[in-house]
Image (cartoon, grey):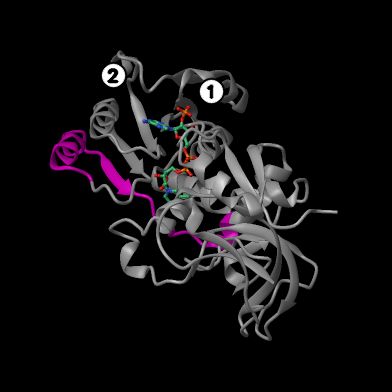
Amino acid sequence: MKAIKIHEFGDTEVMKLEEVEHPVPQADEILIKMYASGVNPADYVVRQGGNEILKPFLKLPLGLGLDGAGEIEAMGSDVKGFKKGDKVYGIPNFLGGTYAEFIAAKATQFAIMPNNVSFNEAGSIPSCALMAWNGMDLGKVGAGQRVLINGAGGGIGNLAVQFAKAKGAYVIGTASQRNFGFLKQLGADEVIDYKDENFASLLRDIDVVFDASPVFNEDARIIMAVALKDGGRFVSVQLPYPFSEEFLNILAKKHGEAKMIRRELDVALSLTDIAKLIEEGKVSIIVSKVYPMEKVAESHTELETKHVRGKIVLEIRKEN
Ligand SMILES: NC(=O)c1ccc[n+]([C@@H]2O[C@H](COP(=O)([O-])OP(=O)(O)OC[C@H]3O[C@@H](n4cnc5c(N)ncnc54)[C@H](OP(=O)(O)O)[C@@H]3O)[C@@H](O)[C@H]2O)c1
């Protein structure tokens, strides 16, 4: 079977489509015939050699890819709740490498995918969806709250907009102007250009900030913290950038909370709840482009622009 591997860190050309050994599932694992893998920022960060958080875990050679969707081909003896042929989506344990024709992964990291979407759609979102879901949980997002989502058009951001709307929040998204119409269609109540020179004066009385931007900007972080109400909450996806003293002082004066995103919710349960929202038509999956495995380099180049709308997908095999 084929998979994308890297034997050195570097530019997009270090990714090679290779013949590799077919995985065999352990007792608690499912063997998945993969149809699609999401392309996520962690993939290019790993390819480049990692950041401060990832570096200690990266041992070459490595597969790439955090998440995906496929069909169960076989199961270990301890696996319950799935059967051969089930269509699943999920997030194998970190560095599992989903850019592959088959993967073996812990069954607890997967759920039945929504029944009204393609493999490409389902495979594009598990990691981003889980991050956005965690963001709503950590931010205690609820009905009537004013929720600011920074980077609202991206992989995590667009799902956060939809999850917050599904919870009944008033959603303010930030984006470049070309994404204003898109975000309004997704349900955002207000859209603001994060490059607007009046950015600070456009924000007020925010209950929750969910910073889902792939670009760290301390000034923007401070502006958004200042816009929080007393007791407001700030959740960030920017794991390699700890909160500064100045930022934490602002939060303390507002009796607020600041949290970095963590994968602390049950993966299978969360993905099952998310699948329900998708099947009910409350959340849409936005795939802006599909690349075949042979074009993995182009998929990374596009994601590295940091201006992808929704998700891009690596199609592992075509769906009938
Ligand atoms: N994907 C995951 O599973 C995951 C997991 C943990 C952590 N993270 C981290 O979360 C961050 C976001 O991930 P993602 O997958 O959502 O990224 P992404 O899809 O690449 O994000 C693209 C979006 O970022 C927006 N953006 C670009 N520059 C911005 C800026 N200066 N201010 C505000 N928004 C900006 C773009 O908006 P416009 O095009 O409208 O300008 C675009 O909509 C990354 O740093 C990633 O490392 C991701």
> Residues in magenta?
243-270
* Mark 2: few/some/many CA within 10 Å (<14, 14-19, 20+): some
Would you say the residues marked 1 and 2 are in contact, meaning their CB atoms lie under 8 Å apart?
no
Disc 1 marks a residue whose amino acid type is Asn
Per the image, label 1 sits on a secondary structure element best described as helix
Q: Is residue 34 above or below residue 257?
A: below
- Rendering coords of residue 182 (x, y %): 59, 23
Answer with mark 1 or mark 2, whichever residue precedes in sequence. 1
The residue carrying mark 2 has its beta carbon less than 8 Å from ligand 1: no
- Rendering coords of residue 152 (x, y %): 48, 31
In the rendered image, which quarter is residue 210 located in?
top left
Report the residue marked by disc 2: 200
Q: Which quadrant would the C terminus be assigned to in this image?
A: bottom right
Report the residue marked by disc 1: 179
Q: Is residue 185 above or below residue 118?
A: above
Which mark lies nearer to you, 1 or 2? 1
Q: Does the segment drawn in magenta span residue 157?
A: no
In the image, 100 versus 218, the foreground residue is: 100
Residue shown at the point (65%, 54%) measured from the top left: 294
Per the image, label 2 sits on a secondary structure element best described as helix
Image quadrant of ligand 1?
A: top left
Disc 2 marks a residue whose amino acid type is Ala
Residue shown at the point (68%, 74%) measured from the top left: 31
In the rendered image, which quarter is residue 79 located in?
bottom right
